[in-house]
Image (cartoon, rainbow, N blue to C red):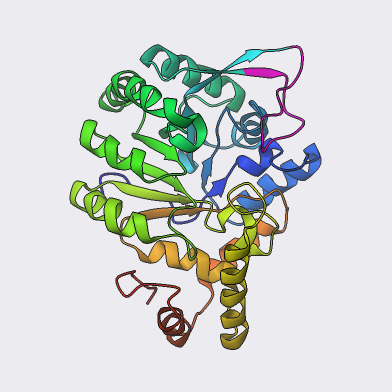
Amino acid sequence: MRITLPTLGFGGAPLGNMFKAVPEDQAQATLANAWQAGIRYYDTSPHYGAGLSEMRFGKLLSGKPRDQFVLSSKVGRLLQPADQPENAKPFTQELPNRRVIDYSADGARRSIESSLQRLGVDRLDVVFIHDVSEDQHGPKWREYFAEAMQGAAVALTRMREDGMIRGWGLGVNLVEPCRLALEQADPDVFLLAGRYTLLDHREALDTLFPECARRDVGIVVGGPFNSGVLAGGEHYEYDRIPEDIRRRTEQLQALGERFGVDIRAAAMQFCLANPVVQSVIPGTATPARPAQYVSLLEASIPADFWQALREQGILPEDAPLPR
């Protein structure tokens, strides 16, 4: 791979008050415990809480030696001061900033400058063009995508060539924009959220990962628990859990109980078994979780469990499995 990242990272959306407000002391305890657990890759975005997640990360990371951690953030939304928080779904009690969609080259540079100020660091390692996809922008997404390829992508490629960042890509919840970016630009890595999991993997396996392997482009898997449903939560893809997903999750949980496997461990280890996947970045706002994630990644899972997933049609034959 042209870029390598730590196997386990920390996803920053929950610390932007996703779904519910997180007290500041709890947020800082969660980040401190992540560092203590040995996690050294942190991903955030101006979108998460309208700058709140970045500011919370900055309280920890600005005091750490910069060469001891990997940091990624995103461009595509500029933040401007506002009288009231937007509280854009799924976030609540955000900072009082207004989001302005901007996928231009200048917008990308300005977004990075603002992120660095909120984070209190001098550089980002990886920059993702955020949410340039149909689920976020509806039919207009292709116009935004064209702007991103002609603007932000060009600026980020130049920053990579100048050594200002290590790499760039898209941070999206859908596969199609990643495929198009491979055709139109020279990305290094994609942050693909919720599209390579125990519940949803077919499209990525069929249409994206083979080309990523050919181009030496890596994948960061965000949302390995599909917004929490695979970890016992009450959300799927930032919303209520559909009945078919609930049934499939119960099927997975029953197999986990049969083989003594924590489904969260299976979810994380499944992602990393694919050779194009560089990192998995579950998010949390619970201080105990980071150490748990480290343990889950190291947990022993019997081969019979994986075989049962194939026999029951949960995983296809061509999906790489952990050894």
Residue that appears at 23% across and 48% down: 216
Q: Nearer the viewer, residue 274 or 228?
A: 228
Say whether residue 142 is magenta.
Answer: no
Residue that appears at 76% across and 42% down: 20
Q: Which residues are magenta?
A: 83-98
Say whether residue 94 is magenta.
Answer: yes
Residue 170 visible to the viewer: yes
Q: Quadrant of residue 163?
A: top left
Image side of residue 249 versus residue 184, left or right: right
The total of numbered circles placed on residues is 0
At which x and y percent is residue 93?
77, 31
Q: Is residue 49 above or below residue 3?
A: above
Residue lying at the far left of the rendered structure:
214
Image side of residue 125 versus residue 250, left or right: left
Q: Main secondary structure of the magenta part?
A: loop
At which x and y percent is residue 267?
51, 66
Q: Nearer the viewer, residue 205 or 164?
A: 205
Q: Nearer the viewer, residue 299 or 67?
A: 299
Residue that appears at 45% across and 81% down: 312
Q: Is residue 13 above or below residue 250?
A: above
